[in-house]
Image (spheres, rainbow, N blue to C red):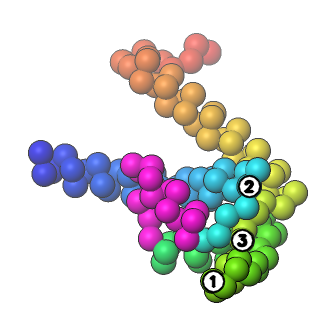
Amino acid sequence: MIKDTIKHEKWDSQLRKGSLELVVLASLNGRQAYGLELLKSLQQLPTMQLSEGTLYPLLDRLKREGLIAAEWYQEGDSRPRKYFQLTDEGQIKLAALTDRWRQSVADIEYLLDHPGPDPLFEE
């Protein structure tokens, strides 16, 4: 059982690394969120157990690439928070990544449903 847990942790980690940009863009679709809020919402998902040290550099990169915008807001007496939201370019990138994700899932589903030595596609 411990070996299975370790294997799943490795699998989840690799899956997370490959999909994190899509996950963050999707999380910001149609809303603004500050970093810690975004982190906590993602950590509620079983396969998205990431740290601040992973999220904040990604947010910085996405901002540099023009996919998200950030603005500081003061809320009452609390310290200011930096809120992130998608830009138009971020919406376009999200749509493209979503299409690729869905195609990848469809490809994997095909392979799972069609195992065996037969050729995958007829020529």
Residue 57: give x, y in percent of width and height.
59, 77
Query: Which residue is more in the foreground, 15 or 91?
Result: 91
Q: Are marks 3 and 2 in contact (CB under 8 Å)?
A: no
On whether residue 116 falls in the magenta region, the answer is no
Q: Secondary structure at mark 1?
A: loop
Q: Which residue is mark 2?
A: 31
CA gap, disc 3 to disc 2?
10 Å
How crowded is the residue under tag 1: few (<14 C-alpha within 10 Å), some, or many (20+)?
A: few
Which residue is situated farthest in the left direction here? Answer: 1
**Residue type, label 2:** Arg
Q: Is residue 110 above or below residue 47?
A: above
Query: Which residue is more in the foreground, 86 or 2?
Result: 86
CA gap, disc 1 to disc 3?
14 Å
- Give the mark nearest the N terminus, 1 or 3: 1
Question: Which residue does the image show at 49% across and 31% down from the upper left?
Answer: 108
Q: Which residue is mark 3?
A: 83
**Residue type, label 1:** Ser
Per the rendered image, the range of residues in magenta is: 36-51
In the drawing, does residue 64 fall left or right of residue 105?
Answer: right
Q: Which residue is mark 1?
A: 78
Question: Which residue does the image show at 76% across and 78% down from the upper left?
Answer: 73
Q: Is residue 39 above or below residue 16?
A: below
Residue 88: give x, y in percent of width and height.
87, 57
Circle 2 or circle 1, nearest the eye: 1
**Residue type, label 3:** Tyr
On whether residue 40 falls in the magenta region, the answer is yes
Circle 1 or circle 3, nearest the eye: 1
The answer to whether residue 24 of the structure is visible from this angle is yes
Q: Are marks 1 and 3 in contact (CB under 8 Å)?
A: no
